[in-house]
Image (cartoon, rainbow, N blue to C red):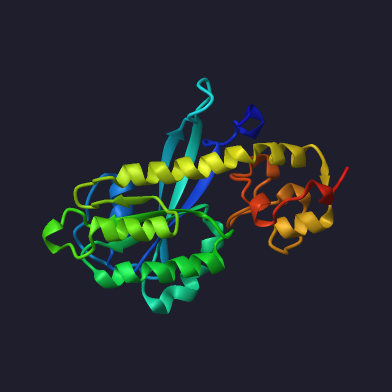
Amino acid sequence: MGDSMINPAIEYDYLIKFLALGDSGVGKTTFLYQYTDGQFNPKFISTVGIDFREKRVVYKPKTPLNAKPYRIHLQLWDTAGQERFRSLTTAFFRDAMGFVLMFDLTSEQSFLNVRNWLAQLKVNAYCDDPDVILVGNKADREDARVVSPTRAQELADKYSLPYIETSAFTAQNVKETIELLLEKVMTRMEETIGIITYIRGHTMCRQCIDMMCNQTKCPEDQVSFGLNYTPIDQLPTNYPLLIILYDPSNVNI
């Protein structure tokens, strides 16, 4: 990514939103709390609707070797797993750039419901193949495990997902999970940087602008992805291009 994507007036270079999904009680809240605060909260309080935590990190692209680091502001959205909140939580799917899909290694039902969550993602996410990490949580409770590593890996392979076993209690693989998801998201962004540069240098047609705004009309310099409008030169991600399968022939030059 070039320097043109940096705005020195703000404290970070990119705002990245991740969404934690899974049944109630699998450990989404404690997982996110462990990541942001480095602590385990043993008190279980079921999330009502949706909540989020934040953390600033520095991301350095693996290539090229002299690539500059980027300041990332992570918003980690925590969703309620109960069915009665499903319509509320799915409304946030399109605003997320990556997903942590979690099940409880001690709960067979939460593992079986992974397929249901994937079906919800397919319908509500920003594209058909969003970046998802499948997470088997509560790895510290080996004596109560009912989902074997083999079964979990087979499910992950079926849907072409990375699989990681974590423990919010011991912090096992918590940081590594978010880092892997961030790497996948940033790599996808970098692969389409040529398209975002092309858009910035030309005038988009009205149809293209409308599609990027999810059929909502707004000025070209207010094209955004997420809950808040952002000028295109501060756009936290170029994922909208993937949503509309951007075609340069739709650009008025």
List the single residue furthest toward the bottom: 84
Image quadrant containing the C terminus: top right
Q: Is residue 94 above or below residue 70?
A: below
List the single residue furthest toward the left: 143
Measured as percent of width and height from the top left, residue 227 is found at 58, 57
Measured as percent of width and height from the top left, residue 131 is found at 49, 52
List the single residue furthest toward the right: 253
What residue sits 24% from the left and 52% below the top? 168
What residue sits 19% from the left and 65% below the top? 146
- Total labels: the figure holds 0
What residue sits 52% from the left and 35% below the top? 11
Image quadrant containing the N terminus: top right
Q: Nearer the viewer, residue 202 or 142?
A: 142
Is residue 218 among what the camera can see?
A: no
Measured as percent of width and height from the top left, residue 98 is found at 48, 52
Is residue 112 among what the camera can see?
A: yes
Q: Is residue 130 above or below residue 116?
A: above
Measured as percent of width and height from the top left, residue 71 is found at 49, 34
Image quadrant in which you'd find residue 118: bottom left
What residue sits 34% from the left and 58% below the top? 154
